[in-house]
Image (spheres, rainbow, N blue to C red):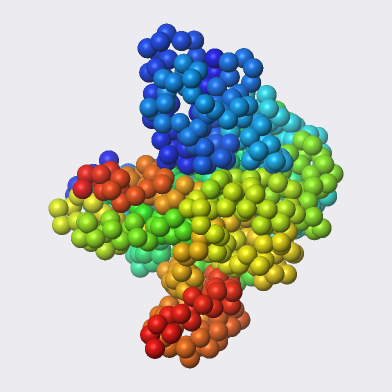
């Protein structure tokens, strides 16, 4: 699992520098930072800007364009539930409504105890075995609300 | 005894890893001589986890298998489906692009070459650039990412461009609901995509390739990265491809959850580390693409079909199909469907045959109400359009599109007003923000559909107008084609819009 500790400047810079030889390195840098900390720390933006000769506003603009990059830590478990059409055809709307209700949160929300974050995802390529979900990176097909809640320990 | 179990993520999502672990434990406990080989998926998702056992007479299929079935399966007392190849869903297919998928170990280069792999590349290495491009043109291959543009013509533009560096960019963003062909081939036969990209590089004079792979596919990312390393180690990639004196290397890059980044110019911006905003064309990516250099942008299936075109010849490929839709198309049948999965066939099969006969109707057993073809920007077809043959022009003629060839089936409980609303909502969430009709129009679209739902009949005209504006005033197909699912739902399923009105009155 990722760790959401207080990030050290030198450590973040080292992560950034690992990608310096690449063409178009910014997304790989964001991914690497998020893989390490669970989110992209705000303190990393000026480092990225300096390294890549961009303004902080530009770096922020790129980060905020993409649904994947978080600016604060997620819950201990990340539950992504597919909201797209093929899963809707198999009852995904009712299923996700039940999950969110039981957890007492809305999409993108995290339970007050910090255990679970629920995020929408638009297709996991599991459209012939929907409704589909992903729990901490593991795929789940023919999901139901009880199974998903059990997977995240709720 | 050899035992084959898929490592495809759909199989895993249904428990294939647990079945494989159970098999390994049972084999050890009984002291059996058996080898477990993890393959890609055969594409019969309703049978996953599928286990194939070869006791010396070919592979026999069993599935879906649960960990509880393992003992019976190894004891030979579990009922199966007979020889895998005779299962009608497989027997009725023409597998060219997916010939190896589900058969071989995805990360064994030896297995790959034993099943025809690298024959196409070896042939291409003996041809000139112009001959390579001419072969692709002659095959009639058209882009499988959605637009159906002839691949050979695109390659020819890049071939003719003068530059110190050219690129091959593989579009593996596969964001359309109901599609998973790209994922399946990347997880199940990754060397096939790599081989196709190398041939593309040789053909147009590009030495560097990128696969832009969506982050929603962690399994495919892992398999592709491993395959690239193996291919480089074996000299399929690198400074001297197969010792023939030409260079080509490639990298896997991970997307970040933006649907619009499947649009090729947005993808290129994203790959360059920018916001994934759509670029105006011209300039064409073929002339000014990645880093401003001439770039081939092709879908995974377009590129993964190139090896078989070279292995069997353009004429062989072009002999399949219907009209200007040549060759085969891996159709993905999904949603509320009895036999969902991947069905590769020559173009031309009527939609209704695919749904009623091949896929066996709905999973719930209720009547089919609507099918959406071609992802979230594709139209909803009612049963009355089920005789439409699967082909680019044929679908276009019916007000639809085949897109990346995904079919999503809905039973009679589907709420088409809800689906129209979702299409607008999705467009609003995923809009890159460049055009007002898309960015703002989609938000208004959701509101307008909510008004219809509340019984405001006059809002139907507003919605129709709004769709016209979005069609005319959008730079790319996200804003431009969202009216397809919306208007087709409204046109073909008026009751779903009207009953609400009456209920409110
Ligand atoms: C909103 C939008 C999303 C798209 N998504 C994809 C995608 O996920 N995969 C893809 O191959 N093409 C996608 N396309 C089509 C690409 O722009 C482009 O036509 C394609 O990558 C060209 O490759 P091809 O000729 O091999 O099909 C999308 C287009 C639009 C407008
Ligand atoms: S139609 Fe929408 S997604 Fe496409 S360029 Fe315009 S704003 Fe961006
Ligand atoms: S639509 Fe849900 S996995 Fe594809």
Task: Residue at 28%, 58% (x, y): give it.
Answer: A98
Q: Position of residue B113 (x, y in %)?
A: 67, 26
From this view, report whether residue B439 is shown above or below residue B335: below
Which of the pair B364/A115 is nearer the observer? B364
Task: Residue at 74%, 64% (x, y): give it.
Answer: B394
Image quarter of residue B65? top left
Image quarter of residue B129? top right
From this view, report whether residue A119 is shown above or below residue B221: below
Q: How many marks?
A: 0
Q: Position of residue B105 (x, y in %)?
A: 56, 28
Residue that protrudes farthest toward the bottom in the picture: B458
Q: Position of residue A90 (x, y in %)?
A: 44, 55
* Residue B265 can be seen, yes or no: no
**Relative to residue B241, is residue B360 drawn left or right?**
left
In the rendered image, the quadrant that contains the C terminus of chain B is bottom left
Task: Residue at 35%, 60% (x, y): give it.
Answer: A94
Task: Residue at 39%, 57% (x, y): give it.
Answer: A92
Which of the pair B357/A138 is nearer the observer? B357
Residue that protrudes farthest toward the left in the picture: A113
**Relative to residue B274, is residue B485 drawn left or right?**
right
Which of the pair B400/B504 is nearer the observer? B504
Q: Position of residue B33 (x, y in %)?
A: 49, 10
* Residue B320 can be seen, yes or no: yes
Image quarter of residue B81? top right
In the rendered image, the quadrant that contains the N terminus of chain B is top right
């Amino acid at each position: 699992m990722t760790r959401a500790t207080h990030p050290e400047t030198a450590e973040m810079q080292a992560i950034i520098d690992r990608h310096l030889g690449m063409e178009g390195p910014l997304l790989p840098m964001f991914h690497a930072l998020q893989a390490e900390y669970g989110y992209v720390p705000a303190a990393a933006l000026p480092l990225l800007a300096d390294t890549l000769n961009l303004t902080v506003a530009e770096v922020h603009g790129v980060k905020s364009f993409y649904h994947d990059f978080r600016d604060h830590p997620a819950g201990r478990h990340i539950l992504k539930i597919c909201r797209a059409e093929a899963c809707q055809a198999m009852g995904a709307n009712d299923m996700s409504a039940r999950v969110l209700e039981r957890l007492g949160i809305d999409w993108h929300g995290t339970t007050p105890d910090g255990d679970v974050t629920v995020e929408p995802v638009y297709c996991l390529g599991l459209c012939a075995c929907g409704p589909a979900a992903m729990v901490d990176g593991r795929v789940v097909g023919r999901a139901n609300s009880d199974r998903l809640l059990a997977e995240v320990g709720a | 005894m050899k035992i084959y179990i898929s490592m495809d993520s759909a199989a895993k999502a249904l428990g294939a890893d647990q079945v494989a672990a159970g098999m390994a434990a049972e084999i050890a406990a009984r002291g059996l001589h058996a080898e477990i080989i993890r393959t890609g998926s055969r594409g019969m998702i309703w049978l996953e986890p599928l286990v194939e056992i070869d006791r010396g007479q070919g592979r026999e299929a069993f599935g879906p298998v649960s960990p509880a079935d393992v003992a019976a399966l190894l004891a030979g007392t579990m009922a199966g489906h007979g020889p895998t190849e005779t299962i009608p869903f497989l027997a009725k297919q023409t597998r060219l692009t997916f010939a190896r998928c589900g058969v071989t170990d995805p990360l064994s280069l030896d297995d790959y070459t034993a099943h025809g792999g690298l024959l196409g590349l070896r042939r291409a290495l003996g041809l000139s650039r112009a001959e390579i491009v001419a072969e692709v043109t002659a095959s009639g291959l058209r882009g499988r990412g959605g637009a159906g543009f002839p691949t050979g013509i695109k390659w020819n533009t890049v071939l003719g461009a003068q530059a110190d560096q050219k690129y091959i960019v593989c579009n593996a963003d596969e964001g359309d609901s109901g599609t998973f062909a790209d994922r399946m081939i990347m997880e199940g036969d990754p060397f096939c995509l790599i081989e196709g990209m190398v041939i593309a590089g040789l053909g147009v004079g590009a030495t560097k390739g990128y696969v832009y792979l969506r982050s929603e596919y962690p399994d495919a990312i892992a398999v592709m990265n491993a395959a690239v390393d193996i291919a480089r180690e074996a000299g399929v990639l690198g400074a001297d491809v197969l010792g023939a004196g030409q260079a080509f290397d490639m990298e896997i890059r991970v997307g970040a959850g933006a649907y619009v980044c499947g649009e090729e110019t947005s993808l290129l911006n994203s790959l360059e580390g920018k916001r994934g905003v759509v670029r105006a064309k011209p300039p064409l990516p073929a002339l000014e693409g990645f880093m401003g250099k001439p770039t081939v942008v092709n879908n995974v299936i377009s590129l993964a079909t190139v090896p078989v075109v070279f292995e069997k010849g353009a004429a062989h490929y072009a002999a399949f199909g219907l009209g200007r839709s040549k060759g085969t198309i891996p159709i993905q049948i999904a949603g509320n469907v009895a036999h969902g999965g991947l069905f590769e066939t020559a173009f031309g099969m009527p939609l209704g045959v695919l749904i009623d006969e091949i896929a066996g109707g709905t999973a719930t057993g209720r009547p089919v109400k609507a099918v959406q073809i071609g992802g979230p920007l594709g139209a909803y077809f009612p049963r009355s359009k089920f005789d439409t043959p699967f082909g680019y022009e044929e679908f276009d003629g019916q007000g639809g599109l085949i897109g990346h060839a995904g079919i999503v089936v809905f039973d009679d409980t589907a709420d088409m007003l809800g689906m129209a609303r979702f299409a607008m909502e999705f467009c609003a969430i995923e809009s890159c923000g460049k055009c007002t009709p898309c960015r703002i129009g989609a938000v208004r679209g959701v509101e307008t559909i909510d008004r219809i739902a509340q019984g405001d009949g006059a809002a139907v005209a507003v919605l129709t107008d709004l769709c016209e504006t979005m069609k005319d005033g959008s730079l790319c197909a996200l804003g431009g084609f969202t009216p397809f699912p919306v208007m087709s739902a409204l046109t073909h399923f008026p009751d779903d819009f009207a009953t609400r009105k009456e209920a409110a009155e």
